[in-house]
Structures are given as C-alpha cells and as structure tokens.
Amino acid sequence: MWVVLALLLAVSSGALSLDPLNMCMDAKHHKVEPGPEGQLYSQCAPWRDNACCTANTTEEAHTNNSTLYNFNLNHCGAMSKKCEKHFIQDTCFYECSPHLGPWIKEVNQSWRKERIVDVPLCQEDCHDWWEDCKDEITCKSDWHFGWDWDSGINKCPAGSKCRPWTEVYPTPKSMCEEIWSNSYIYTTYTKSSGRCMQLWFNGSNPNKKVAEYYYNNAQQHQSFALTMLLSLAFTSFSVMKH
Ligand SMILES: *[C@@H]1O[C@H](CO)[C@@H](O)[C@H](O)[C@H]1NC(C)=O
Ligand SMILES: *[C@@H]1O[C@H](CO)[C@@H](O)[C@H](O)[C@H]1NC(C)=O
Ligand SMILES: *[C@@H]1O[C@H](CO)[C@@H](O)[C@H](O)[C@H]1NC(C)=O
Ligand SMILES: *[C@@H]1O[C@H](CO)[C@@H](O)[C@H](O)[C@H]1NC(C)=O
Ligand SMILES: *[C@@H]1O[C@H](CO)[C@@H](O)[C@H](O)[C@H]1NC(C)=O
C-alpha cells in the first residue's frame, strides 16, 4: 500500500528539476537553457530578451537550403518570398521559444530527443500562413518524414507529384496540423484571447502567459486525477482490511 502511495507521489512531483514554463527542448540546435541573445537576426529578433536559439542559428534560418537541417523549401520550384517568410517565422518560433514546455514530448529521432506536439496556434497566424502560401506547389503533406535524402537535401520521393498547395492542404487547418506531423494544432482562438501561441509578435513575448495557462490547467487535471487515485487506493485498502 505505502509503496503505491510513494510511487504516486514520486510520479506527481517528477519533473521538478526543469521549469516547464522557461526551458529549451533537447533538440539539434537548442541551447541548454534560455537566456538573452542580443544579436538575434531579422524575423527572430522578437525573442532576443529570452531565447533558446543563438544568433548564428537565426541567421542560418533566413537562408536558402540552410545548414540547420539541409531542408529545401524549393523542392517543387522556387517558393515565393511571401510564403517563405512564414517558414522563417516558424523556424524562429521552433528554435527560439522558451515557453513550449507544456507541449514537449520525448522522441526517438536521429536529430533530436524531444519535439513539440499539438501546440495551439492562433487562428490569424495559421490563416495568414496558408493565405500567403496557397499559390505554391509541393509534393507532400507531411514535411517531417518520407523525403528522399540521398543527395543530402530533401527531394520529392519517387512516386510523388508536385501538386497545387490547395490540393495538398485544402484548408489552413490541414496545413498547420499536417505539415510538421502535429507539432501544431489548429484553433479558432485569436491573438487577443491569451489561449493560443503566436508565431508573429512584437514587444514582450505573449506566449509566456499562454503556456502558464495551459500548464496550470494540466496540473489541475493531474492533481484531480491523483486525488481520485488516492481515494480509490484508500477505499480498496479499507475494503481489503475488512
Ligand atoms: C553557433 O555558434 C555556436 C558558438 O560558436 C556553435 O557552438 C554552434 O555550433 C553554432 N551553430 C550553428 C548552427 O552554426
Ligand atoms: C538549394 O537547393 C536547390 C535544390 O537542389 C538548388 O537548386 C539551389 O541552387 C540551392 N540554393 C542554394 C542557395 O544553395
Ligand atoms: C532563394 O532561392 C530563390 C530561388 O530559388 C531566390 O529567388 C532567392 O533569392 C533565394 N534566397 C536567398 C536568401 O538566397
Ligand atoms: C530508438 O531507435 C533506435 C533505432 O531504430 C533503436 O535501436 C533504439 O532501441 C530506440 N530506442 C528507444 C528508447 O526506443
Ligand atoms: C509588428 O510590427 C511591424 C512593424 O511595425 C508591423 O508591420 C507588424 O504588423 C507587427 N506585427 C504584429 C504581429 O503585431
């Protein structure tokens, strides 16, 4: 009985060593801990007060076929600047955000030990991204997996076809959720709601409060579940004694 209780308590207080609201994921280019980075480049500049990325990562994020992942956005021909800027912003968000803790999960992938899953995106950011990219062409809906990497950069795999964006992604939701295999989840929350994460912002990082909200909500559910488990355990303990 006491072993079970001790285990439950250990599980519930498990992740005390890292602050889930101010941390960096364990991935290819992330710093170990977030901190100020005065020189963050161009579109990544909003994160300079507190970032998980370094200046050279952000500079690299703005180049074609960046050496960060050797990922080629122009796999079906040149991507327009207006679309490309959303992918740059997405890279800034992924590499720099110190407030993704509530959505970080362990993975067994060659290039990282952790990833993000189901980060709730603000509706405006997802819609603007899709609007600015809807005239592009691509050959895959999932850009994480399934490329032909034989040449060192991603090429469309055999049997795939370059198709209109709107055929591959009929809606903003399908694009935001499928493109990075559910790193993002589509929401109808707007930027002013405080319930969704912003890719694009100016001034102080609005995503800290959003992460706090989701983290505290999850904690409430967890402690409710723990209370239920404990009372169940006590009930069955007293039943056993009778
Ligand atoms: C950026 O610079 C740091 C420090 O010099 C270095 O450790 C890191 O590998 C560099 N990253 C990239 C992507 O060039
Ligand atoms: C990026 O990769 C594409 C596809 O292989 C290639 O055509 C292009 O020249 C490369 N651009 C740069 C700047 O290296
Ligand atoms: C990226 O490549 C496109 C065409 O492939 C070119 O128009 C654009 O200038 C390049 N951008 C950079 C930053 O090199
Ligand atoms: C991770 O994947 C590698 C290669 O597929 C495998 O050898 C290893 O056992 C996996 N590790 C875990 C913890 O699943
Ligand atoms: C940030 O500021 C720039 C320049 O003033 C503006 O064009 C842009 O719309 C602003 N972005 C957001 C998300 O407020």
Image (cartoon, rainbow, N blue to C red):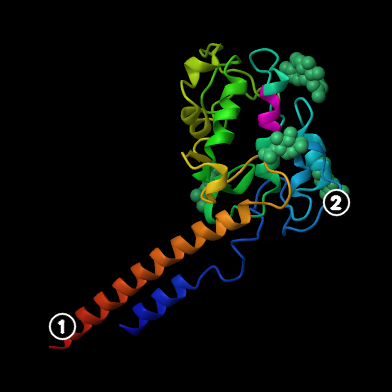
Instruction: Name the side, left or right, on which 170 lies relative to 41.
Output: left
Q: Is residue 239 left or right of residue 123?
A: left
Disc number placed over residue 221 in the picture, else none: none
Judging by the rendered image, the residue that carries numbered circle 1 is: 239
Q: CA distance from mark 2 to mark 1?
A: 62 Å
Q: How many marks?
A: 2
Q: Vertical placement of 8 versus 18: above or below? A: below
Residue 38, labelled with which disc?
A: 2
Residue 144 in the image, given as x and y percentages of width and height: 57, 32
Q: Is residue 87 magenta?
A: yes
The residue depicted at 44 percent of the width and 61 percent of the height is: 218
Is there a contact, CB below 8 Å, between mark 2 and mark 1?
A: no
Asked if residue 94 is positioned above or below residue 227 in the image, the reply reads: above
- Could one spot residue 222 in this view of the protein? yes
Q: In the image, is residue 13 above or below residue 179? A: below
Identify the image quadrant of the N terminus: bottom left
Judging from the image, what secondary structure is the residue with disc 2 in? Answer: loop
Please state which amino acid type lies under the numbered disc 2. Gly
Dominant secondary structure of the residues highlighted in magenta in the image: helix
Residue 122: image x %, image y %? 54, 40
Q: Residue furthest left?
A: 242
2 or 1: mark nearer the eye: 2
Residue 18 x, y percent position in the rendering: 62, 66
Q: Which residues are magenta?
A: 83-88
- State which quadrant residue 158 falls in: top right
